Image (tube, rainbow, N blue to C red):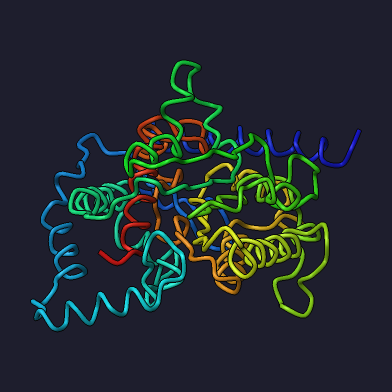
Amino acid sequence: MKEWAIRFCFVILGVVLTLGTLKIIDFVKGPEEVETEIVEVPVITTVVAEESKVTEEDFADEARAMFDSLFSTTPTTAVEEEESESEDESEDTGAKLKWKEDYPMIDSDCTLEEKMAERSSYEETMATNAFDKMVIENSTIDFSGVKISVMGDSITEGNTLPEDEKEEYNWPAQLASILGCEVENFGIGGSTVSNVVDNYPMCERWNEIPTDSDIIIVMGGSNDMLFENKWQYGELEYDKRMTEGTFCGDLDRMLGAMKWTYQDNNEDGYTELIYINPPSCILQDGVYNVDPGNMVHQSEFAEAINTIAPAYNFSVIDLYNNNFLNSHDADINALYINDGIHGNKEAYRILAEHIASQIIQRIEQ
């Protein structure tokens, strides 16, 4: 039996043990169990679901304050407006959208542990969703004629949705509906970033994405963190990173090649590049806890993405460190991510609205 198959058996065992722990904690609801550490490093605790739940409407005031602070504008004179229009014409790069040059490359400013100390993932997700909806509702950007291509795994493909919901409710389809533009879905269930397990690796199929894409979004790493040990993860240090057949090495090669193809030498125009750092996933705890000496914690995969992606001009939507749709939270697990990693149609709505909001925030209005 192949090594990956043996590891898969241990993964399933670890997942069963981890989810069993979550159900026990949810049932008992004792104060000591709430403090139970799921993994050793970093410490991530399971948040127990409460009977009364808030919704995004409860965070309307917070969302409004945040919106006003980010999008408040001062009146401009006619001369300033003419100068702005002149600059826009002279600095035309062929892009259909005018991207902000000073927008942060990574949308997180603290660690997952710091975010979890502030409030639960459920509360964080609801608050973020309230803000995202406000951004979308107030957007003046016309996305008609814009083409977005998305590459990912089963989370992107949406193949775990019920058969009658797959086509309409995967998150790229919902993103297309929100923005009113074309979104092509290159998600394949089981796909990894690296070619370690040779399962439709993104590092070998990225060039299937058309060069006339205005925006390319990559959401990868969820399968890598479930199946790759520390040798297959590789090393993040730059001088030791470029080992083919490792997560760090293949991610670096892939993103470098994508920047060269879609930005530096793209005759079809300019393409904005975005990487989505997957949310914290309780299934990975089962993998890590089976063999913590050899397996790699998700925090290290997240660090690799946040280090390598911006180096190749990919802006990062960091779901991991922003505690967004974190399946360690029992409310998130029960309402949105029932199997610990894949979302239902409501989870993908929330995700699509967040991605739409992040795109809108990066564009001049």
> Residue 356: percent from the left, percent from the top?
35, 50
Identify whether 214 is placed above or below 335.
below
Is the residue 53 above or below the residue 45 in the image? above
Q: Residue at x 53, y 61 (%)?
A: 269
Q: Residue at x 33, y 41 (%)?
A: 180
Instruction: Indicate the quadrant where residue 26 lies.
Output: top left
**Is the residue 302 above or below the residue 100 in the image?**
above
Q: Is residue 162 left or right of residue 205?
A: left
The image quadrant where one finds the N terminus is top right
Q: How many marks?
A: 0
In x, y percent, where is residue 351?
39, 44
At horizontal 57% and vertical 58% (from top left) the residue drawn is 268
Above or below residue 245? Residue 56 is above
The residue drawn where x is 27% and y is 55% is: 141
Q: Position of residue 23 (x, y in %)?
A: 46, 32
Which quadrant of the structure image shows residue 349? top left
